[in-house]
Image (tube, rainbow, N blue to C red):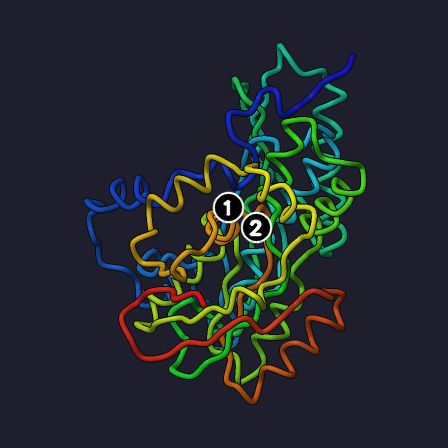
Amino acid sequence: MDIKLTQFSHGGGCGCKIAPAVLTELLADTPLRTMPKELIVGTETSDDAAVYKLNEEQAIVATTDFFTPIVDDPYDFGRIAATNAISDIYAMGGRPIMALAVVGMPLDKLPLEVIRKILAGGESVCAEAGIPIAGGHSIDVLEPIYGLVALGLVHPQRVKRNSGARDGDLLVLGKPLGVGILSAALKKGLLTSDGYATMIRHTTKLNTPGARLAELDGVHALTDVTGFGLAGHLLEICRGSQLSASLRFADLPLIPEAVGFVKEGISTGASTRNWTGYGAEVALPAGAPDWQQKLLTDPQTSGGLLVACAPEAAAVVLAELHGAGFAEAREIGRLEVGAPRVNVT
C-alpha cells in the first residue's frame, strides 16, 4: 500500500505553526501570574524552551515540538520531527537527557507498519543524541502528528536566552535557508532526488554545537531558526535585547535548489503569513525582488542555530560549527543600538 503522508497535511513541518500575528493575539490576554524565582526562562521573551533552576550547578531545560508530515517517507518524518524538537535544548545551551513522544495518528487511514516507522525514525535520532524516549502519549486524530517533549540540563550561568544579545554583536547562522521552499516543491512533485537528499541532510542534523557555544563567554544569545523564518526569529532576538539588526543578504547561506524554485514562484503559505505578521519590522532594499522576501520568511523545519556573539568570538563560533559538519555556517550581519527591527542590505 503506497502511503503519502503529506496528503494528510494541510501544512507540513514548522510551516504548520500558528502565524505570528495570530499567536500574538492569542497570547495577548494571557494573565500574568507570579512566577517562582527558580524559573529562569518562561514565556516573556519567546525563547526556545523553559528553564528551571534546580541548584547552583544545574537547571532543567524543557520544551515540546510536534507537527504534521513534511515528507512522505515515515522514517524520515520521524527523524525530522525528533531533530527539530531536540534542537530547542541545544538552542538554550543545554544538553538533552531524555524525551517523551507525542503521537497523534489517523488509525483508520495509516497502517500500523507506517506508524512504527515514524516512531523508529524518532528513536534513531534520540539514540544519536544519546538519550532515551522514556514514555509519551498517543491519540487517534485526523492528521498524522509526531514530535517530542525534550528535556535537558544546563548550568544556570550558561543559559543562552534570545534576549542576551549586545550592541556590536555579530550574527552567525549555522544552516542554509530554503527548507520550506523544498518542501513546497516536494508537494508539487517537482523536487529531484538530489534535492530531497539535501532537504533530509539539513533537517536531520542535530544542532549539537549549541551546548559547546554556550560555554563561550563571547556568545551572548542563541536561538534556532524554525517556523517563523530567519527574519522572524532574528526579530525575537531584537525585541528581547532591544537592538536593531543589519543583515547582508549576499552573505546568507542558501540552498541552491531552493533559490531556483523560489525564483520560479514556489514558496509556502506560511512564508506569506510570516510576512503579514512581522513584515512592517523588516526593511528590504528598494526594488528587492519578491524571492528575497520569501527566503527571509521561509519556515525552516529543524533549522540552524542563530548566534549573537562578540566580534572577537566569531571565528571560534564558526570554527565550532564548521568542525561539527555545518560547512555552510556563515557570519551574516550584526546588531546595534536602535528600535527592534531587521534591516536588509
**Which structural element holds mark 1?**
strand
Disc 2: which residue: 150
Q: Badges 1 and 2: C-beta atoms under 8 Å apart? A: yes
**Which structural element holds mark 2?**
strand
Who comes first in sequence, dot 1 or dot 2?
A: 1
| Total tally of numbered discs in the picture | 2
Task: Tell me the kind of residue under disc 2.
Answer: Ala
Q: Quadrant of residue 35?
A: bottom left
The disc at residue 64 is 1
Name, please, the residue furthest toward the front. Answer: 287
Residue positioned 57% across, 66% down in the render? 250
Q: Circle 2: is it few (<14), some (14-19), or many (20+) Cα within 10 Å?
A: many
Residue positioned 40% across, 38% down in the render? 18
Q: Does residue 134 show up?
A: no
Q: Circle 1: is it few (<14), some (14-19), or many (20+) Cα within 10 Å?
A: many
In the foreground, 151 or 337? 337
**Marks 1/2: CA–CA distance:** 6 Å
Query: Left or right of 288: which side holds 121?
Result: right
